[in-house]
Image (tube, rainbow, N blue to C red):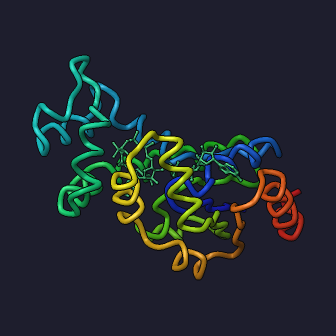
Amino acid sequence: MIIGLTGSIASGKSTVANMLKNYGLPIVDADIVARLVVEPGTPTLRKIVEAFGEEALTDEGAMDRQKIGSIIFNNEEKRKQLNGIIHPAIRQEMLRQRDEHFGNGANTVVMDIPLLFESKLQHFVEKIIVVSVSEETQLNRLMERNQLTEEEAKARIASQLPLSEKEQGADAVIDNNGTIEQTARQLENILRKWEVI
Ligand SMILES: CC(C)(COP(=O)(O)OP(=O)(O)OC[C@H]1O[C@@H](n2cnc3c(N)ncnc32)[C@H](O)[C@@H]1O)[C@@H](O)C(=O)NCCC(=O)NCCS
Ligand SMILES: Nc1ncnc2c1ncn2[C@@H]1O[C@H](COP(=O)(O)OP(=O)(O)OP(=O)(O)O)[C@@H](O)[C@H]1O
């Protein structure tokens, strides 16, 4: 089975992904892949420099995440341009990792894709878990974790589809407003229902 794990920024995907890892399920993590495909020397990083200029790089020649983030979370055109460059490389590597896990005998693989709905990747997975929180909880946790101002946090949240819309497309929704334990129990019930554990 291929499980798609998504939600919105700071809704708790990584928290739930770690729980899934503890069940021994392999995780293909889009955010990790997104870092892999832009490492110094990759064709994708070269295309980003062609599009955004040398200012896209740190002095060490890596992608300047702070700089690119400040550009694309406040400019939809620039965000679409970056997505057009980086998403094909992310997709290719995610599918490679997915097939590698099945090749190694996995029965179930989890694909942790923040932009699953935005990038219309539903066909990559069989079941979708959406990790959902209230706007207030999301804003507070994002500001706390990334040390962002309210304005910066709201810009990042606004760059994604609303969680209410994602819940419509979910096979299961985890309400992550409560404690980690309450989230873990919801996940356990979902995995039992799907006979994954
Ligand atoms: C813009 C970048 C440089 C910011 O890096 P930074 O280290 O500050 O954030 P990080 O990579 O940890 O992403 C945190 C979260 O931001 C959100 N996010 C990232 N990229 C995007 C995007 N293009 N559109 C909307 N939300 C995004 C996701 O919820 C992600 O989980 C980085 O997010 C990036 O390279 N984004 C483009 C690749 C992408 O779309 N990744 C999402 C994988 S589905
Ligand atoms: N149930 C919870 N109770 C308290 N804090 C939580 C809970 N779930 C997540 N957090 C915290 O909220 C923040 C966001 O959680 P997490 O990083 O799992 O979200 P995410 O969806 O993976 O975010 P991103 O989209 O940025 O990768 C983290 O600091 C995490 O420790």
Q: Nearer the viewer, residue 36 or 163?
A: 163
x and y percentages locating residue 51 in the rendered image = 12, 45
Residue beneath the point at 69% across and 71% down: 173
Image label count:
0
x and y percentages locating residue 136 in the rendered image = 55, 64
Residue beneath the point at 30% across and 36% down: 66
- Specify the quadrant that holds the N terminus: bottom right
In the rendered structure, the answer to whether residue 68 lies left or right of residue 2 reads: left
Residue 92 sits above or below residue 60 on the image: below
- Specify the quadrant that holds the C terminus: bottom right
x and y percentages locating residue 50 in the rendered image = 11, 40
x and y percentages locating residue 55 in the rendered image = 14, 33
Residue beneath the point at 61% across and 53% down: 13
For residue 102, say whether it is visible: no
Residue 105 sits above or below residue 12 on the image: above
For residue 60, say whether it is visible: yes
> Which residue is situated farthest in the top direction here?
60
In the rendered structure, the answer to whether residue 40 lies left or right of residue 78 reads: right
Classify residue 137 by image quadrant: bottom right
In the rendered structure, the answer to whether residue 94 lies left or right of residue 24 reads: left
Residue beneath the point at 86% across and 59% down: 185
In the rendered structure, the answer to whether residue 128 lies left or right of residue 147 reads: right
Classify residue 81 by image quadrant: bottom left
Q: Nearer the viewer, residue 32 or 74?
A: 74
